[in-house]
Image: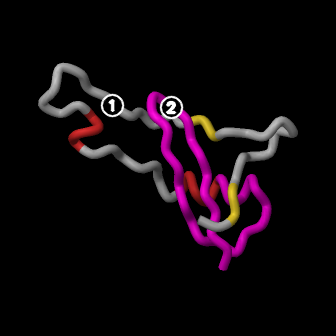
Amino acid sequence: MAKYTIPLNGYASATLTIETDETDPELILEEALNQGVPGICAQCSGWGRPFSIELGDEWEETRKPDGTPEIYEGA
Protein backbone atom coordinates (compact mmCIF):
# COMPACT_ATOMS: atom_id res chain seq x y z
CA MET A 1 0.00 0.00 0.00
CA ALA A 2 1.46 3.39 -1.02
CA LYS A 3 1.62 6.40 1.31
CA TYR A 4 0.76 9.91 0.07
CA THR A 5 1.13 13.39 1.60
CA ILE A 6 -1.39 16.09 0.65
CA PRO A 7 -0.69 19.79 1.43
CA LEU A 8 -3.71 21.92 2.40
CA ASN A 9 -4.06 25.68 2.82
CA GLY A 10 -6.42 27.65 5.02
CA TYR A 11 -5.66 30.18 7.72
CA ALA A 12 -2.79 27.84 8.49
CA SER A 13 -1.14 25.12 6.43
CA ALA A 14 -1.39 21.42 7.13
CA THR A 15 -0.65 18.13 5.47
CA LEU A 16 -2.48 14.83 5.60
CA THR A 17 -0.69 11.53 5.21
CA ILE A 18 -2.72 8.47 4.28
CA GLU A 19 -2.08 4.96 3.06
CA THR A 20 -4.23 3.76 0.17
CA ASP A 21 -4.26 1.44 -2.80
CA GLU A 22 -5.74 4.23 -4.95
CA THR A 23 -3.58 5.76 -7.70
CA ASP A 24 -5.95 8.44 -9.05
CA PRO A 25 -4.99 11.81 -7.46
CA GLU A 26 -8.64 12.96 -7.20
CA LEU A 27 -9.65 9.75 -5.37
CA ILE A 28 -6.60 9.97 -3.10
CA LEU A 29 -7.55 13.55 -2.19
CA GLU A 30 -11.18 12.58 -1.56
CA GLU A 31 -10.14 9.68 0.67
CA ALA A 32 -7.74 11.92 2.62
CA LEU A 33 -10.36 14.63 3.17
CA ASN A 34 -12.90 12.03 4.31
CA GLN A 35 -10.55 11.15 7.17
CA GLY A 36 -10.73 14.72 8.47
CA VAL A 37 -8.27 17.57 8.73
CA PRO A 38 -5.87 17.94 11.65
CA GLY A 39 -6.39 20.33 14.55
CA ILE A 40 -3.72 22.46 16.15
CA CYS A 41 -2.26 22.27 19.63
CA ALA A 42 -3.08 24.77 22.39
CA GLN A 43 0.24 26.57 22.00
CA CYS A 44 -0.18 27.05 18.25
CA SER A 45 -3.81 28.11 18.66
CA GLY A 46 -2.77 30.98 20.94
CA TRP A 47 -4.61 29.58 23.97
CA GLY A 48 -3.83 31.86 26.93
CA ARG A 49 -2.17 34.46 24.69
CA PRO A 50 -3.34 37.75 23.18
CA PHE A 51 -3.99 36.07 19.81
CA SER A 52 -5.89 33.01 18.74
CA ILE A 53 -6.27 30.89 15.64
CA GLU A 54 -9.39 28.91 14.84
CA LEU A 55 -9.38 26.47 11.98
CA GLY A 56 -12.60 26.23 10.04
CA ASP A 57 -13.81 23.42 7.84
CA GLU A 58 -12.91 25.18 4.61
CA TRP A 59 -9.56 23.86 3.45
CA GLU A 60 -8.34 24.33 -0.09
CA GLU A 61 -6.09 21.70 -1.60
CA THR A 62 -3.02 22.76 -3.53
CA ARG A 63 -3.26 21.96 -7.24
CA LYS A 64 -0.64 21.66 -9.97
CA PRO A 65 -0.81 23.92 -13.06
CA ASP A 66 -2.62 21.13 -14.95
CA GLY A 67 -5.37 21.13 -12.30
CA THR A 68 -4.57 17.81 -10.63
CA PRO A 69 -4.17 17.74 -6.82
CA GLU A 70 -0.62 18.19 -5.53
CA ILE A 71 0.11 14.82 -3.92
CA TYR A 72 3.49 13.37 -2.98
CA GLU A 73 4.10 9.65 -2.89
CA GLY A 74 5.99 8.42 0.13
CA ALA A 75 6.35 10.25 3.40
Which sits in the foreground, 64 or 36? 64
**Residues in magenta, as a range:** 1-29
Which sits in the foreground, 37 or 52? 52
Q: In this image, 65 relative to 69: left or right?
A: right
Picture quadrant of residue 49: top left
Q: Amino acid at mark 1?
A: Glu
Q: Residue at 41% x, 50% y: name it.
A: 38
Q: Residue at 79% x, 61% y: name it.
A: 24
The stretch drawn in magenta includes residue 73? no
Report the residue that reaches farthest toward the left.
48
Which sits in the foreground, 73 or 24? 73
- Structural distance between the alpha carbons of marks 1 and 2: 10 Å
Is 3 rendered above or below residue 37?
below
Q: Earlier in the sequence, mark 1 or mark 2?
A: 2
In percent of width and height, residue 56 lies at: 41, 33
The image quadrant where one finds the N terminus is: bottom right
In percent of width and height, residue 34 lies at: 54, 55
Dot 2 corresponds to which residue? 10
Is 26 rendered above or below residue 9?
below
Q: In this image, 46 relative to 5: left or right?
A: left
Dot 1 corresponds to which residue? 54
Report the residue that reaches farthest toward the top.
50
The stretch drawn in magenta includes residue 12? yes
Q: Residue at 73% x, 69% y: name it.
A: 22
Disc 2 packing (10 Å; few <14; some 14–19; many ≥20)? few
Report the residue that reaches farthest toward the front.
75
